[in-house]
Structures are given as C-alpha cells and as structure tokens.
Amino acid sequence: MNLLHPHTGLYTDLYELTMAQGHFFAGRHETRAVFDYFFRKNPFEGGFVVFAGLADLLEALQDFRYSAEDIDYLAAQGFKPEFLDWLRHFRFRGDVWAAREGEVVFPYAPIVRVEGTIVETQLVETLLLNLLNFESLIATKAARMRLVAGDRIIAEFGLRRAQGYGGMQATRAAIVGGANNTSNVLAGLHYGLPVTGTMAHAWIQSYEDELTAFRKFAEQYPERCILLVDTYDTLRSGIPNAITVARELEQRGYRLFGIRLDSGDLAWLSKRARQMLDEAGLTYVKILASNQIDEYVIRSLREQQAPIDGYGVGTRLVTGHSSPALDGVYKLS
C-alpha cells in the first residue's frame, strides 16, 4: 500500500461502508447527491484558513478502489456477496468543485462541493476530511508565520516531529502556506519542492574539534555552506570558528552562506553574532535561527529587532501547535 496516498476504499470509517451497503440493497445507490465541505471555527484563534490538500485529494480520488484483498477483508467482516461484487468494480466518477489551494477561506462558506451518486459521495467522506482538514490546518499555521516573517526565509524542518507519514502532507501544506523550502527529501521528490539543509550537532561532535568539523564541511559544500555554531559555546567558539572558515572560503573564491543559531536567547545571540560578523567584514553572511519557532516567537524576535535572516520551523508548524485539528465537516446539501 502506498503510505503517502493509501488508494484503497478501506481508508475510511466503517459506517461509510455499512451505509453504502444499505443504499445498495434499498436500490438507492444510484440516487444523486451533493455534499459540501466547510469548517465552523478558525484555528489558532485567528481570522482565516488557508485552503490546502486539494491536489492530494484529487490524486487519491482518481485511484480510489477496492482490491481483491480489500474485498476479502470486507467479506470476513460480514458484508454481503452481492454488494461486494458491485464494490469490486467501484470507481469514483463524481464531480469535485473547489476553491484553489492557497486561497483564504472563512467559516461556514462551502470550500469543496462533491456531486455524484449517494454512495460514491459518501464513501469518500473520510478520505476527504482527513486530507483537507490536516493540510489546511498546517497551511494556515505556515501562513501565520509568513505574515509576521515578512520576506525572511522560512524553512520547514518538521519531519522528525511530525505525526508519522502525515509529515509528507505537512511539508506540502507548509509550502502552500508560505514556507520557502523543506528539509524533507522525499517530499521534495514526490511534490517537486525545493529542499534545503544545514548540519547537525552530531557532525561537529564526530570530529576532534569544532574548527576541524567546520573546515571539513566547507571543503565539501563551499557554495551554500551553513555552519551550526551553538554546539559548544556560540560566542567564544562557534562564531569565531565560523569566521575563520568564512575567510578561508573567501581565499578559495567562495562565500559562507550563513550560520545557524539553535539554542539560547536568539534575539541577543543574533545581535552579537551580527556584530562579530560585520566587524570581521562578513556583512554578507546570513543568520538563521531554529528551536521551537512559531509566529509568536518570530514576532517577538522582530519586535526586538533581531537581525535574523531566516527561520527553521519544525514542531510547532507540522503539528499545528495550539490547534491540533481543523473542525472541517462534510454535509449533505
């Protein structure tokens, strides 16, 4: 089974199938129906939602079916042979009308309309809600960060803290909502997204000293080198060693792209880092920050005039921190 898009009609709640069988034996399964998707309350105590998940939904609907294995399982659950014979040939042939992904939407306004038979429109309910509620939630969180970050870089780093394979959809939704790029390599391949990355503390700790670790990294990746400067002592070790490597890169015809702060008082450390870099003539080196970043942290940093050029956001983005779910519903019109 494709864990990114489980194209099986079993990716649903049981009652969708029991209702479908009920309609089938009542002779109502070809009755036409219209369902609307909407939500009732904005998440994050905010004023809007950014719609996302439509592309994933359409891809899933195009291959929504029941395999022989699925049919055997349903038979073991007590579903009747006549219904299962019909279900094994099922394909979604309904019509989907929707807002564009990335559009701002509001409570109670229909965002997606599904038209078709009563059975096909009902069977896709759980899949639709699963994809649209989650991706719209994460896209909205990303948009809130974009609004306060302005033109600063927002890199999505959340895969390791995401909810299992939902990290794929979270990455895509983050880009829809305004993130520039992602560390998620598989999402980069699957969705055609720009990928980015720096280094981990483990790289530095694996060498005998920090300067050697920086040099070895810069030797291999001189064109877009970003050094993580807080493994030992940001101001006494990390930044001075980064300055040394930056000067060595200049001698080779390259420029250090940036440094990353991943702990401590980000506002104060970024100001000291900027001062040290500028005094060394490295005004072009960017300062990136990570560590539990969200829209509130970004706003605070900007209010403190922290000279940060970009943010690595993870946990609080891909988990929809503070609003764990969007209350989208799918109702018969």
Image (spheres, grey):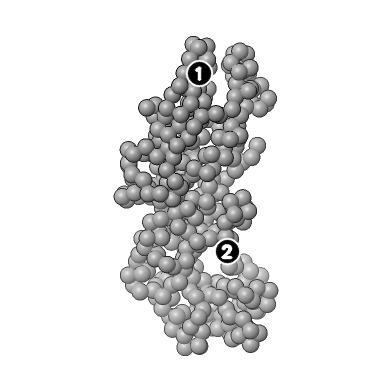
Number of numbered labels in the structure image: 2
Residue 9: x and y in percent read 58, 29
Residue 73: x and y in percent read 63, 23
Find out whether the residues at labels 1 and 2 contact each other: C-beta distance under 8 Å.
no
Query: Could you say which is closer to the camera, residue 291 or residue 91?
Result: 91
Any part of residue 25 in sight: yes
- In the rendered structure, the answer to whether residue 108 lies left or right of residue 252 reads left
Query: Could you say which is closer to the camera, residue 1 or residue 203?
Result: 1
Q: Is residue 198 above or below residue 31?
A: below
Question: How dense is the environment of label 1, judged by Cα within 10 Å: few (below 14), some, or many (20 and up)?
Answer: few
The outermost residue toward the top is 26
- Residue to which mark 1 is pinned: 30
Q: Residue at x 47, y 53 (%)?
A: 176
Residue 123: x and y in percent read 51, 27
Q: Nearer the viewer, mark 1 or mark 2?
A: 1
Q: Residue at x 62, y 66 (%)?
A: 202
Query: Could you say which is closer to the camera, residue 206 or residue 307?
Result: 307
The CA distance from mark 1 to mark 2 is: 49 Å
User: Quick one: quadrant of the N terminus?
Assistant: top right
Q: Is residue 306 above or below residue 45?
A: below
Residue type highlighted by circle 1: Glu
Sequence order check, earlier mark of 1 and 2: 1
Say what secondary structure mark 2 lies in: loop
Q: Residue 103 has which mark?
A: none
Residue type highlighted by circle 2: Thr
- In the rendered structure, the answer to whether residue 2 lies left or right of residue 38 reads right
- Residue to which mark 2 is pinned: 196
Any part of residue 10 in sight: no
Say what secondary structure mark 1 lies in: loop
User: Quick one: quadrant of the C terminus?
Assistant: top left
Q: Residue at x 58, y 80 (%)?
A: 255
Q: Residue at x 41, y 78 (%)?
A: 271
